[in-house]
Image (spheres, grey):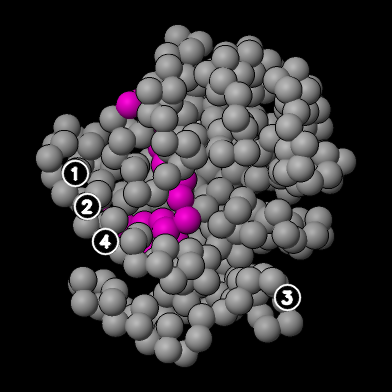
Amino acid sequence: MSNILLKGIAPALITPFDKDGNILTDSIKKNIDMNYGQGAKGFYICGSTGEGPVLGVEKRKQVAEATVEHSNGRGIIINHVGAASPDEAVILSRHAKECGCDAISSVVPNFYYKYNDNEIIEYYKRIADASELPVIAYAQGLYTGDIVALMEKLIKLDGIIGVKFTLTDFYSLHRIKELNGGDINVINGPDEMLLCGLSMGADAGIGSTYNVLCSEYCKLYDLFMKGDIRAAQEQQYKINKVVTIIIKYGVIRSIKYILTLLGVDSGEAVFPGTPLTENEKASLKQELTDIGYFF
């Protein structure tokens, strides 16, 4: 069986909350429907965009259950189970299997400690055994070792099928894609460099701004797959104008506000994240309107 589980565009799903911190499951459903309608091939839940690392286990379970139930087989659901506590990661891994997720993913557990490769490998073994689901490793800035060497070891383990690559070293992305005869699911992470990742071998993209630009990223992906690289480049430039504005005002809180403007009430960022002020909301909306992003 091929390890290429995800192809195409998958938003890193925003987790919406009311003012008391309760999860707005109806908004999760609306966002899922909106993005499937624009071409999404699945969702990545409870990652940094979904604020998973600052949510408790029960709330993360609630997000997983609501997403799987409403997705209803329309796409691939990848559940990020990474946590400061490996024990919590194991609990979430088991739950991901129980509630019907298609795969799990996790950052390495080094929020405070720099674990070596052997320790990281043992961690991924443990969550793979706990979930009995395909596992997508996560390459990002917390890991400072040789990511290609680490992935060469990980892909040999039962259950490990790929990596979410949220680094900007696309030479390493390409080298990873060459592992295992190319049978490794490499997923691009940086939104503003999706075309770079695809050009160097990525099978798919997962990103935060996909929540509000899914159709635009799907267009980029389709242009690339058709071989129209110049048009794909222009599409990436167009997307990046929006991304730059979102970064300026704060990624999660900006995306939540834009979703609310689009009819998906998403609340605010989890404490201690602060909401946009009314002036910031007005400025954000105006800047987006000025470059042609319509609500």
Q: Which mark is residue 241?
A: 4
Q: Secondary structure at mark 1?
A: helix
* Residue depicted at x 42% and y 36%: 168
Between the residue at mark 4 and the residue at mark 3, the CA separation in whole angstroms equals 33 Å
**Gap in angstroms between the C-alphas marked 2 and 3:** 37 Å
Which SS class for mark 2? helix
| Percent x, y of residue 212 | 39, 64
Residue tagged 1? 233
Assess whether mark 3 and mark 2 are in contact (beta carbons under 8 angstroms): no
Q: Is residue 9 magenta?
A: no
Q: Earlier in the sequence, mark 1 or mark 3?
A: 3
Q: What is the CA distance from the residue labelled 1 to the residue labelled 3? A: 40 Å
For marks 4 and 1, the one nearer the N-term is 1
Q: Residue furthest right?
A: 87
Vertical placement of residue 250 versus 13, above or below: below
Tell me which amino acid carries mark 3: Asn
The answer to whether the residues at label 1 and label 2 have Cβ atoms under 8 Å apart is yes
Q: Tell me where the magenta segment starts and ends, as one range.
A: 200-216
Instruction: State the residue position of label 2.
Output: 237
Cα gap from disc 2 to disc 4, whole angstroms: 7 Å
